[in-house]
Image: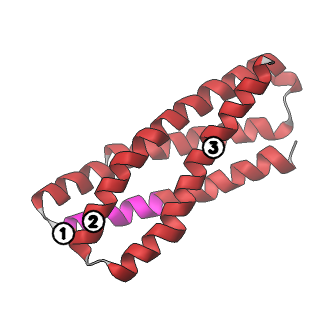
Amino acid sequence: MRPEAVFLFLHILAAVVWVGGMFFAHQCLRPAAMAVLEPPQRLRLWDAVFARFFPWVGAAVAILVLSGLALLHRVGMSTAPRGWIGMSAIGLVMAAIYIYIVAVPYRRLRSSVAAQAWPAGAQALASIRQAVGVNLILGLATIALATVAV
């Protein structure tokens, strides 16, 4: 198997985990949780979901960066498809947003849930939702760049 194929497979797999997970959480899980759970249960659910999802995203980010760099190195910057440069730039912005989410509002959500400080937890969750919404839009734009602007 060619190394490029392995790098591309890992890259796409990591993008599916990250962007697909954001889509599911933002568009499916959130509305369902809002409809059937009271705020304390909803915040506990999100705390548990993020505790499982964010390590996967961290691994996906690392795989995306490393596989993307490997693909760019093998192809060469001057011969890389046009969309790859934009995809790389957006991907780095997305990674920074992910780091912010984990370092700031998610930390606040965890401590708020542990202290049963529900209003503070709700504010932290709202910040996460907004940042994930931005990252979801950026992720979808990146997919468009990767497939349309080749």
Examine the image and state in which quarter residue 87 appears: top right
In the image, 108: left or right of 86? left
User: Tag 3's secondary structure?
Assistant: helix
* Quarter of the N terminus within the rendering: top right
Residue type beneath disc 3 = Ala
Can residue 128 be found in the magenta stretch?
yes
| Range shown magenta | 120-131
Furthest residue to the bottom? 35
Viewer-nearest of labels 1 and 2? Answer: 2
According to the picture, the residue beneath numbered tag 3 turns out to be: 15
User: Tag 1's secondary structure?
Assistant: helix
According to the picture, the residue beneath numbered tag 1 turns out to be: 118
Magenta stretch, overall SS: helix
51 or 62, nearer to the observer:
51
Can residue 103 be found in the magenta stretch?
no
* Quarter of the C terminus within the rendering: top right
17 or 82, nearer to the observer:
17
Q: Earlier in the sequence, mark 1 or mark 3?
A: 3
- Tags 1 and 2 touching, CB below 8 Å: yes
In the image, 22: left or right of 8? left
Mark linked to residue 67: none
According to the picture, the residue beneath numbered tag 2 turns out to be: 43
**Rendered residue at 89%/25% (across/down):** 79
Looking at the picture, how far across and down is residue 26, in whole percent? 50, 65
